[in-house]
Amino acid sequence: MTRVPGAERDRNSGQGFASGKKVKTWKASPQIYPTQLSKATEAALKEAVEFAVREYGERSMPELEAEDKVAIASEKAPTEDPVIQKLRNVYNRIREEYEAFTKAEHNEVVKLGGLHVIGTERHESRRIDNQLRGRAGRQGDPGSTKFFLSLEDNLLRIFGGDRVKNMMDAFRVEEDMPIESGMLTRSLEGAQKKVETYYYDIRKQVFEYDEVMNNQRRAIYAERRRVLEGQDLKEQVIKYAEKTMDDIVEAYINPELPSEEWKLPEMVAKVKEFVYLLSDLEPEQMEDLSMGEIKMFLQEQVRIAYDIKEAQIEQVSAGLMRQAERFFILQQIDTLWREHLQAMDALRESVGLRGYAQQDPLIEYKSEGYEMFLEMMTAIRRNVVYSLFQFQPQIQAPVQATSEVG
């Protein structure tokens, strides 16, 4: 093994330990090297390391950066760094000596028949068994595999183990006698197929559950990205306000009932609750309007109210309204999205019991999850509108320094 210059010095000077605790050093176990390097290669390696120390400065480079330099030296990408070039030349020499030794070992293993893989059980997945078999025949090398099974293995115990055991007792098969039967092999493969199908269905179901959340996540992140990029924040808030007015109208007005039975006073009270600037709004103004005309009237009123609110805020500080819009939208998105994630986790745990009622849990999860997502988006929209209209910035008085007369 080649010692890196400086490692022995650190150990002797006590810098390899701190408060009695061993500190990670550049020394490596000699067991990872296949053979001893030649004297000439060791001298070249020592010279390259000393050259790197002179160029980079002793102890001036973090360990991760030094490892990155070594990794670049082991590649073939062109470089102008003289240290990398010198290290690369030494690396190629070391690699040639190691490959010569490992090639001789490889030829000796091939003469002995190659690698023989012994399996102590059959895995639930045929893919794992095939991977083990593949270890014995890499790149055309010879090799063989052998699997030993027990009647107590899960595959045999669950899928026909008693039948095989009864057959062995009937034919008085000794315990150590090998059984090589195509019927047994086919039975095992059939059992593995059943297990693979079972796990595939589980993975597919998990993916479909996750896909519901992924679709919602993409939608909410797209909304959040538009806010962060500042794309038409005012227009976005106005749309929020108009949609909120539509929701209020639909909650208090039933188009199937005569206009005399519409709850106009309650509707106007709810509008004023969201937009205090519409305090002079009266139900009589909408008595002769249809439901669609009421929506258009309230949308126009909320746009006017928002322009008034913006003018009030801008008197305090120019550009403050855009900052307030970004702040309140992001605040509501982040807060309600976290609550929504917790609610969706609770829903996912609870829908599993729907199967006892002959309902598909996945369909129930998709349906209720979609409704919960719409409710969250509605809550975001309404909270932003309410917060912006209630926003009352205060001008902070300048702080005056006082001095004491002693």
Image: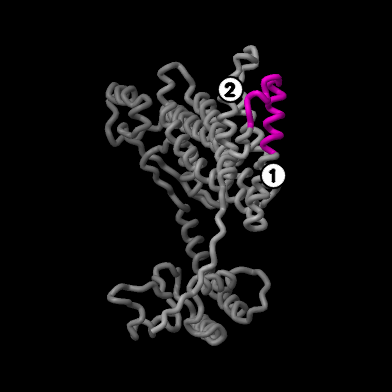
The mark tally for this picture is 2
Residue 307: image tag: 1
Dot 2: element: helix
Residue 252: image tag: 2
Report the residue at 52% width, 36% height from top.
Answer: 210
Q: Main secondary structure of the magenta part?
A: helix
Q: Is residue 359 left or right of residue 256?
A: left
Front position in the image: 73 or 265:
265
Q: Position of residue 322 (x, y in %)?
A: 65, 52
Report the residue at 30% width, 33% height from top.
Answer: 152
Specify few, some or many for label 1: CA neighbours under 10 Å numbering under 14, 14-19, or 20 or more.
few
Specify few, some or many for label 2: CA neighbours under 10 Å numbering under 14, 14-19, or 20 or more.
some
Is any atom of residue 211 visible in this view? no
Q: Position of residue 99 (x, y in %)?
A: 53, 68
Splitting the image into 4 quarters, where does residue 294 fall? top right
Which amino acid, mark 2? Tyr
N-terminal of the two: label 1 or label 2? 2
Dot 1: element: helix
Contact, mark 1 vs mark 2 (Cβ under 8 Å): no
Q: CA distance from mark 1 to mark 2?
A: 26 Å
Report the residue at 54% width, 26% height from top.
Answer: 367
Report the residue at 57% width, 36% height from top.
Answer: 274
Q: Is residue 287 magenta?
A: yes
Query: Which quarter of the rendering shows the N terminus?
Result: bottom left
Please give the range of residues in magenta. Answer: 281-303
Q: Position of residue 202 (x, y in %)?
A: 47, 32
Splitting the image into 4 quarters, where does residue 212 fall? top right
Q: Is residue 82 above or below residue 198?
A: below
Which amino acid, mark 1? Asp
